[in-house]
Structures are given as C-alpha cells and as structure tokens.
Image (cartoon, grey):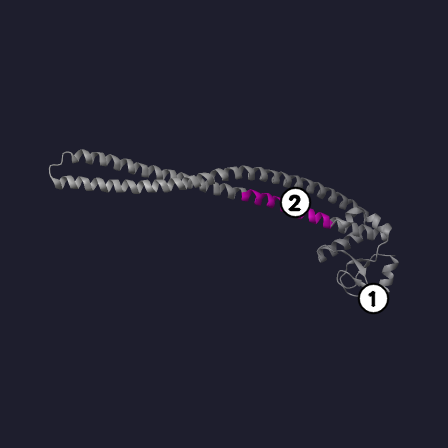
C-alpha cells in the first residue's frame, strides 16, 4: 500500500508541476507581446515628436515666404513712391509700406517663437532616438530571456509528462482511475494528509477507528467526507520514494 500511496503522491506533485509549467509557457508569450507593445508606444511618441518638428519647420518656411513676399512688396511700393505726383499718393504708399513692415515684424516674432520651439522639439527627438536605441536593446534582451525561459519550461514540461506516464504505468488501473476521478472533482488536490485527526483538505474530523486504520498503512484509504486519498505522516522511506520533485509544486 505504501508504494501505491507514494505513487499517488508523486503523481499529484507532477500534475501540479505540469500545470504550473503550462501556465508559465502560456504566460511568457503574453509578456513578450507586452514588452513589444511598450516599445511600439515609444516609437509612436517619437514619430509624433518628429511630425511636430516637421510641422514646425514647414510653418516657419511658410512664414519666411510671407516675409519675403512683403519685402518684395515694400521694394515695389518704394519704387512707386518715387513716381507719386501728389502728397496724398505719397502718404498712401508710405502707409502701405508701414503696414507691410508691421506685418514683417509680426512674422519675424512668430519665426523666433517657432525657432525656440524647434530647438526644444529637436532636443526631444534626439533624446527619444537615443532612448529608443537603449530600449530596443533592452527589449531584445528581455525577449531573448523570455524565449530561453519558454524553451527551458517546455523541456521541463516534457520531462515531467514523461515521468508522469512512467508513474502512471506503475499504478494499478483501479487506483489511477480513482486518482483521475478525484483530480477532476477537486481540481488538483487528490492526496490529503490527516493532521490532528482531521483531513487537512476538507478539515472534517476523522473517526477514531478510521484514523487508526489509516495509521496502520495497510491499504489506500479515502476521506469519508471529501473522498480524497488520505495519508498519515508518511515515513522517511516513503518520502525518499516520492523524490525531490514532490516538493516542487
């Protein structure tokens, strides 16, 4: 009986390990995707900064064109002033020139503002470019580590599944059928321990006679309340049979 119980305990430990590894294998690709999303977010911010800088440069170019156009207009107006025949015509040309000069001063102020903004945007773009290079390197390293972990987890998973099949082959068909039935019912906790006269899974007190039989260890026994396989303080020899993976759940 002790060998059968040891096999059930070992099988439970392997099932927990397999479930944990399967969860890890399923989670790691999501972590990689999240890492990539963060990098894409940084790239989008950088592209936005570049677009803003480009818009600044285009606006400045348009305003510089307006300045040039007004300067050309002033030059023509001055030529026309020389041909003015009356004071009214002269003052009209002079007023129009003053208006154009005022427009130019306004445009030049805007150009200065845009130049200051361009310096800040250019600094932001350069800093973002440098940060992107660092982030890309970090992301690639994190992705490489995640892929290595996936490969290691898959290897451990395959080894655990192979060992599970070997343990299953050693169990009696009846015990394995019970094991699977209980596993489905209890969502993984098949083997429980009798602690202080109780089943440590359902916490229901065990009958004294039942507990005494359990201590004898002559047969596989099941909790009369929750139906789990019960063990009572397994001896060191049996723990050795279970192996180190039993503590890895």
Q: CA distance from mark 1 to mark 2?
A: 43 Å
Residue visible at 77% across and 44% down?
163
Disc number placed over residue 25 in the picture, else none: 2
36 on left or right of 82: right
Say above or below: 23 vs 85.
below
Specify few, some or many for label 2: CA neighbours under 10 Å numbering under 14, 14-19, or 20 or more: many
Quarter of the image holding residue 162? top right
- Counting residues from the start of the chain, the first of labels 1 and 2 encountered is 2
Residue visible at 41% across and 40% down?
118
The local secondary structure at tag 2 comes to helix
67 on left or right of 176: left
Relative image position of residue 131 (x, y in whole percent): 53, 39
Q: Is residue 35 magenta?
A: yes
Principal SS element in the magenta part?
Answer: helix
Disc number placed over residue 207 in the picture, else none: 1
Q: Is residue 56 magenta?
A: no
Relative image position of residue 217 (x, y in whole percent): 87, 57
1 on left or right of 68: right
Q: Which residues are magenta?
A: 15-38
Residue visible at 24% across and 34% down?
72
Quarter of the image holding residue 109? top left
Say above or below: 78 vs 210.
above
Q: Do the residues bearing badges 1 and 2 touch, measured as CB atoms within 8 Å?
A: no
Residue situated in front as seen by the camera: 91 or 132:
91
């Amino acid at each position: 009986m002790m060998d059968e119980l040891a096999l059930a305990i070992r099988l439970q430990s392997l099932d927990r390990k397999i479930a944990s590894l399967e969860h890890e294998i399923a989670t790691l690709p999501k972590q990689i995707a999240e890492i990539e999303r963060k990098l894409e977010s940084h790239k989008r911010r950088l592209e936005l900064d570049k677009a803003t800088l480009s818009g600044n440069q285009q606006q400045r170019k348009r305003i510089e064109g307006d300045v040039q156009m007004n300067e050309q207009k002033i030059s023509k107006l001055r030529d026309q002033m020389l041909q003015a025949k009356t004071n009214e015509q002269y003052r009209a040309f002079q007023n129009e020139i003053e208006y154009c000069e005022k427009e130019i001063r306004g445009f030049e102020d805007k150009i200065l503002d845009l130049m200051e903004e361009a310096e800040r945007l250019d600094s932001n773009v350069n800093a973002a470019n440098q940060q992107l290079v660092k982030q890309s390197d970090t992301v690639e390293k994190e992705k490489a580590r995640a892929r290595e972990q996936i490969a290691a987890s898959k290897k451990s998973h395959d080894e655990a599944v192979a060992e599970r099949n070997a343990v299953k082959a050693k169990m009696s068909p009846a015990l394995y059928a019970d094991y699977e039935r209980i596993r489905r019912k209890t969502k993984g906790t098949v083997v429980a321990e009798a602690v202080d006269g109780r089943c440590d899974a359902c916490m229901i007190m065990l009958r004294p006679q039942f507990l005494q039989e359990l201590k004898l260890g002559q047969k596989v026994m099941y909790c009369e309340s929750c139906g789990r396989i019960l063990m009572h303080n397994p001896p060191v020899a049996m723990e050795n049979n279970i192996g180190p993976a039993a503590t890895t759940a």
